[in-house]
Image (cartoon, rainbow, N blue to C red):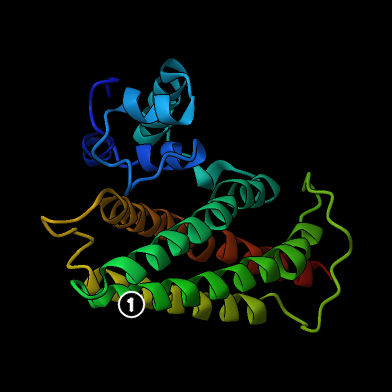
């Protein structure tokens, strides 16, 4: 558990999720990195107890909850889970990571030239993933939900330009592979998301965030490629056989 006397840098080094908490409270990870938590809070006129409480909450969430038994979820609930957990994570994390990468590239690229590439790759990943999840939520997921008579999702009718769900599924899987390739290149450039010994708190937080994003993306893609999409194709085949 973090303490009020630890520095911002020390807390982030032992609890990567602390970076998000500090950023929400406008505690600067670079200029205030070597200040104690109570000193940084005093500068921002923040309650140390409140920040410590949020750090404890973040640490609990970092440990993760019980795994989702995706095979037992109805299609509608599976779609809801993907959107609420993984799509929301993409929307929250990629802009945060891109902002940190931009800041680091501007300040540290003379010492770590790869940070420029990290910045560019994160911006490309953000653009690709935002377009990807929008297509899923506005076209593919509504189409799948309409096929499921027991779906609890109140989507408007899907306006589609395809005759079979297999067509957009194939496209989404190609885009998943593209995202995986970008993340793999980020891992290569950062030597497995390992910050250098001289890294500042922002540097440490960015690499920890990238590692966390890679883990979530793996789970996200598994739920779609290996669970939702095959079930949607099977459901469509069953409906066609009845018709």
Disc 1: CA contacts within 10 A as few (<14), some (14-19) or many (>=20): some
Q: Position of residue 200 (x, y in %)?
A: 23, 52
Give me the residue at 69% from left, 71% from top.
135
In the picture, which quadrant includes the N terminus? top left
Say how many tags the image has. 1
Asked where in the image residue 146 lies, by quadrant, the reply is: bottom right
Q: Position of residue 81 (x, y in %)?
A: 60, 46
Residue furthest out toward the top: 49
Can residue 118 be seen from the camera position used here?
yes
Q: Nearer the viewer, residue 103 or 191?
A: 103
Q: Nearer the viewer, residue 20 or 7?
A: 7
Q: Position of residue 160 (x, y in %)?
A: 82, 77
Q: Is residue 224 left or right of residue 219?
A: right
Give me the residue at 58% from left, 65% from top.
229
Can residue 223 be seen from the camera position used here?
no
Q: Is residue 242 left or right of residue 40?
A: right
- Provide the residue designation for mark 1: 116
């Amino acid at each position: 558990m973090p303490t009020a006397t630890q520095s911002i840098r020390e807390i982030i080094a032992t609890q990567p999720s602390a970076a998000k908490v500090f950023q929400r409270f406008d505690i600067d990870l670079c200029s205030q990195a070597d200040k104690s938590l109570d000193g940084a809070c005093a500068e921002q006129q923040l309650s140390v107890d409140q920040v410590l409480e949020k750090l404890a909450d973040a640490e609990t969430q970092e440990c993760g909850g019980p795994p989702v038994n995706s095979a037992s979820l109805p299609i509608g609930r599976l779609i809801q889970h993907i959107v609420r957990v993984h799509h929301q994570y993409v929307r929250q994390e990629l802009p945060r990571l891109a902002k940190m990468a931009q800041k680091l590239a501007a300040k540290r690229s003379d010492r770590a030239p790869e940070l420029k590439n990290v910045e560019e790759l994160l911006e490309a990943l953000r653009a690709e993933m935002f377009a990807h999840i929008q297509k899923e939520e506005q076209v593919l997921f509504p189409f799948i939900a309409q096929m499921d008579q027991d779906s609890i999702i109140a989507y408007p009718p899907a306006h589609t330009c395809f005759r079979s769900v297999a067509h957009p599924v194939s496209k989404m899987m190609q885009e998943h592979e593209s995202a995986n390739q970008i993340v793999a290149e980020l891992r290569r450039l950062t030597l497995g998301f390992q910050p250098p010994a001289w890294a500042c708190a922002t540097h440490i937080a960015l690499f920890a965030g990238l590692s966390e994003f890679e883990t979530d993306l793996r789970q996200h893609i598994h739920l779609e490629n290996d669970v939702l999409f095959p079930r949607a194709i099977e459901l469509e085949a069953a409906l066609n056989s009845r018709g």
